[in-house]
């Protein structure tokens, strides 16, 4: 059996702080800088899964598939930020997040992460479909609620974004500017640190080869292939009513940009670092989302490791 190519990175959901209509579940940062949510597979005790707006479908890591004796379901291909690779597939009878359950899931089975051996997997669009995924990065809460709840849960001063798309993928895009230069951003809060391509850096008047930037660890996606990156201050980044001054980003011409048809135009993977202190409510089925300040105010998180 073959699965469609999947862009992996990593995101979550969340619910309101302060008398929400639905309490949701805890959303926390793990040691690697990802945000994770408790997830139950086939009725097992919950384990941490990355909740990812950049992932088409659900992933389980090999250790969990082995522990739960998940049946093999053929092979497929996973496409991440840094390339594609063939992987095994596993059959999941049920997967539950915040009381919402999907059944008969064919999940990609990836090798265990060396930096996070107890992560169970990645929650993708298949879990979010038909629901409103609410991620409050200030409150540290996550929820899946009916889409009809949107007016009550999206948050004060929420800005609605009707998302664009990419060829052969379901990722949500939005306009973004760096120092007034417009580019395309992929909503990817499963990615710990924002990545821009060279085309965006140059258009914004930044030279990633200059002394203003320095080498950092290679970008690694689901395929675990490494792509060279430089990191530095890129300027003022603005998107969906959010403004980040003196924002830092990695510059890397990752294969994902090429696969999305964005290698020669200003493009960005919009990561958790620029989404801090926000409340993100995503309706993947209608291809729209709302972005607002967190109901608990901005919080300061430790700097994320430089890998994806």
Image (tube, rainbow, N blue to C red):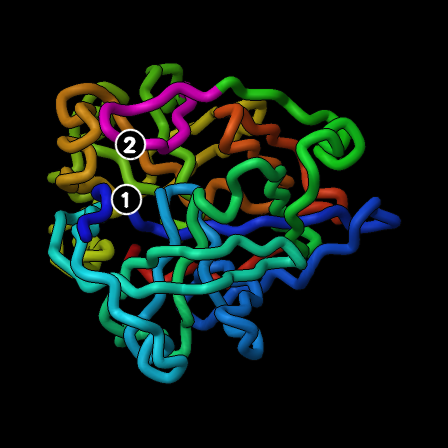
State the residue position of label 1.
7
Up-down relation of residue 308 to residue 152 (above or below): below
Q: Quadrant of residue 205?
A: top left
First in sequence: mark 1 vs mark 2: 1
The magenta segment: 163-175
**Where's residue 105, x and y in %?**
40, 56
Q: Of helix, strand and loop, which one carries label 1?
A: strand
Q: Quadrant of residue 236?
A: top left
State the residue position of label 2.
169
Q: Are marks 1 and 2 in contact (CB under 8 Å)?
A: yes
In the image: residue 101, left or right of residue 213: right
**Where's residue 230, x and y in %?**
19, 47
In the image: residue 10, left or right of residue 298: left
Q: Residue at x 50, y 33 (%)?
A: 284
Majority secondary structure of magenta residues:
loop
The residue most toward the bottom is: 67
Q: Residue at x 28, y 44 (%)?
A: 7
The residue most toward the right is: 19
């Amino acid at each position: 059996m073959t699965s469609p190519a999947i862009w992996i990175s990593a995101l979550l959901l969340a619910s309101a702080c302060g008398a929400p209509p639905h309490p949701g579940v805890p959303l926390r940062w793990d040691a690697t800088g990802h945000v994770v949510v408790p997830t139950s597979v086939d009725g097992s005790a919950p384990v941490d899964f990355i909740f990812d707006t950049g992932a088409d479908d659900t992933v389980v890591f090999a250790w969990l598939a082995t522990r739960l004796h998940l049946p093999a379901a053929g092979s497929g291909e996973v496409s991440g930020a840094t390339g594609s690779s063939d992987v095994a597939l596993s059959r999941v009878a049920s997967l539950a997040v915040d009381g919402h359950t999907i059944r008969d899931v064919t999940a990609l089975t990836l090798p265990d992460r060396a930096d996070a051996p107890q992560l169970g997997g990645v929650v993708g669009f298949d879990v979010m479909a038909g629901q409103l995924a609410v991620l409050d990065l200030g409150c540290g809460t996550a929820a899946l609620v009916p889409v009809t709840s949107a007016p009550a849960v999206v948050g004060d001063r929420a800005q609605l974004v009707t998302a664009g798309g990419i060829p052969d993928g379901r990722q949500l895009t939005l306009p973004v500017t760096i120092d007034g230069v417009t580019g395309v951003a992929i909503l990817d809060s499963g990615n710990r640190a924002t990545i821009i391509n060279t085309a965006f850096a140059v258009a914004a008047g930044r030279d990633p080869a200059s002394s203003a930037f320095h080498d950092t660890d290679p970008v690694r996606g689901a395929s675990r292939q490494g792509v060279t990156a430089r990191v530095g201050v890129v300027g003022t980044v603005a998107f969906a009513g959010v403004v980040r001054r003196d924002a830092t980003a990695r510059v890397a011409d990752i294969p994902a940009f090429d696969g999305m048809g964005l290698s020669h135009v200003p493009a960005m993977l919009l990561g958790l670092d620029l989404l801090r202190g926000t409340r993100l409510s995503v309706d993947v089925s209608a291809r729209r989302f709302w972005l607002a300040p967190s109901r608990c105010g901005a919080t300061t998180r430790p700097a994320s490791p430089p890998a994806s």
